[in-house]
Amino acid sequence: MKNCSIRSCLGQYEEKRIVHVVKRNGEVIVFDNVLAEVCAVCGDTLLPLSTVEALENILMNPGKTLRTAPVYEMAEAARA
Ligand SMILES: [Zn+2]
């Protein structure tokens, strides 16, 4: 297992499936079940090259979305 890249963190990365969010042209795009390496201690997340390539491939050739997700604007909520 790879040691965490955050200095002073003694954690190690574990393979996990995460939710990954990309913002593109102001639009929020959500990827579910993305294979990533997540530090068990601090939560630092690395995306393996194969994952990054797969995400870019989807962004270049966006097909039909499987599900939609609610998006909340926290800047607005904080003002209320
Ligand atoms: Zn860490």
Image (spheres, grey):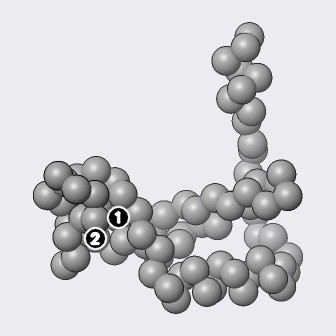
Which residue occupies the extreme top position in the image?
Answer: 80
Residue 1 vs residue 17, the one in the foreground: 1
- Residue matched to label 2: 14
| Residue pictured at 75% horizontal, 44% vertical | 70
Q: Which mark is residue 21?
A: none
Residue 73 visible in the current orientation: yes
Instruction: Name which residue type carries label 1.
Output: Val
Residue that numbered label 1 is attached to: 38
Answer left or right for 7 relative to 75. Answer: left
Labels 2 and 1: the sequence-earlier one: 2
Q: Who's the residue at 54% across and 82% down the image?
A: 51
Neighbourhood count class around disc 2 (C-alpha, 10 Å): few under 14, some 14–19, many 20 upward: some
- Quarter of the picture containing the C terminus is top right
Rendering coords of residue 60 (x, y %): 81, 83
CB under 8 Å between callouts 2 and 1? yes
Indicate the position of residue 32 as horizontal and vertical percent values: 60, 66
